Image: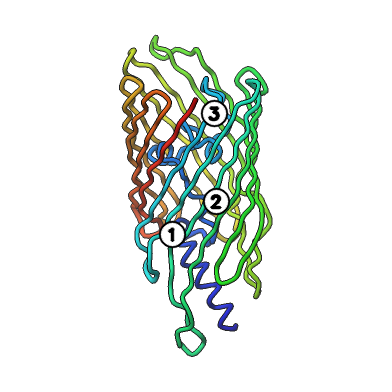
Amino acid sequence: MNSKHMIIIACAALFGATQAKAQGQSLPILTANPDSKTASMGNVSVASDGMYLYNTPSAFFNTDKRFTADASASLYEKEDGAQGLFGLYTATIGYKLFKRHSVFGGFRYAGGLKFNGYDMMGEPTKEYKPYDWTIDLGYSYMIGNGLAAYATGAFIFSHLSKNAYGGAFSVGLSYTKDNLTMAKRPANVMIDAKVEAIGPDLDYGNGHKSSMPTHVSLGGKMEVDVTDIHKVSAALATRYFFRPTDAKVFMLGGGVEYTYNNLLSVRAGYEYGDHDLSHFTMGAGVKYHSFRINGAYMLKTGDGGKSYCTIGLGYDF
């Protein structure tokens, strides 16, 4: 094994460890949740109220707005053996067409770590700064009677010590039921199922390839208007990563949210993950007219995961 190959493997190990250490993945950009609200509710993407492209695109049909825009930043705890902090930075927009169609675009950047490389003799070579970015597109279609389908695609650029290019796509189906009652109060439910990060391996050369973190997800949420100014919601979802085939992972998350006067929300949840990837999750948000700001903190409960915080801004009209 030559020194360049060793450097590539070292980069992959360090970069992938930040979000998916136990999964052996070097593409945390495809699995990390950029949305503060859903992250604080156990990473249950079906509970999205923004950042639709990276959660549940068809949830945009549940609003009366035609345009949505979101941006977020996530910072992870310091990684042993590397300098700097790993961060995920995301921006996305969406537009609703003719009530039945919506289109989305977005950009993600993940990076911030740097470390020194060494040759076979243990001599320092140069500083390495791995990073990834994606350009993302999405489309959702309201089939009717609350049933909607969606698809997203990503062009991926990944840099370890060499560059790799690739693509991945996701498909999903959701069902929304409004005008329900729970304990004689108005309620609604949403169920979502999807397959994400489908695509070929990324090839960095020198025999090193990175498998896509392909996974299936199933989740649901219920929202109840307890009174005119008090609202509660609960959500539950599971994810199963079946690629890479030698590092399969099962995750189960759930969370609750309390909202006062459609203005202030507090949230909490828990996400269980194989290989010590579990987290307690918590957060809060403020929504004023069309503007929203949300924050979340994920506290690791084992050595496999990473604690991190996320802050997001959004605007709809």
Depicted 129 relative to depicted 191: above or below: below
* Kind of residue at badge 3: Phe
In the displayed orientation, state which residue is furthest to the top: 184
Residue 227 point in image, percent of width and height: 33, 13
How crowded pointer 2 is (Cα within 10 Å; few <14, some 14-19, many 20+) is rated as many
Task: For marks 3 and 2, give the one nearer the viewer.
Answer: 3
Residue ID for mark 3: 67
Task: For marks 3 and 1, give the one nearer the viewer.
Answer: 3
Q: Are marks 3 and 1 in contact (CB under 8 Å)?
A: no
Q: How is the image coloured?
A: rainbow
| Identity of the residue drawn at 46% across and 38% down | 44
| Identity of the residue drawn at 66% across and 28% down | 141
Marker disc for residue 18: 1
As measured in the structure, the alpha-carbon distance from the residue carrying label 3 to the one carrying label 2 is 24 Å
Residue 101 as seen in the image, left or right of residue 317: right
Q: Quadrant of residue 229?
A: top left
Marker disc for residue 30: 2
Q: Quadrant of residue 211?
A: bottom right
As measured in the structure, the alpha-carbon distance from the residue carrying label 3 to the one carrying label 1 is 33 Å
Marker disc for residue 214: none
Point out the tag, 3 or 1, that comes first from the N-terminus: 1
Q: Give the number of marks.
A: 3
| Identity of the residue drawn at 41% across and 49% down | 74
Residue 29 point in image, percent of width and height: 52, 53
* Kind of residue at badge 1: Thr
Point out the tag, 3 or 2, that comes first from the N-terminus: 2
Residue 133 point in image, percent of width and height: 55, 55
| Identity of the residue drawn at 31% across and 22% down | 260
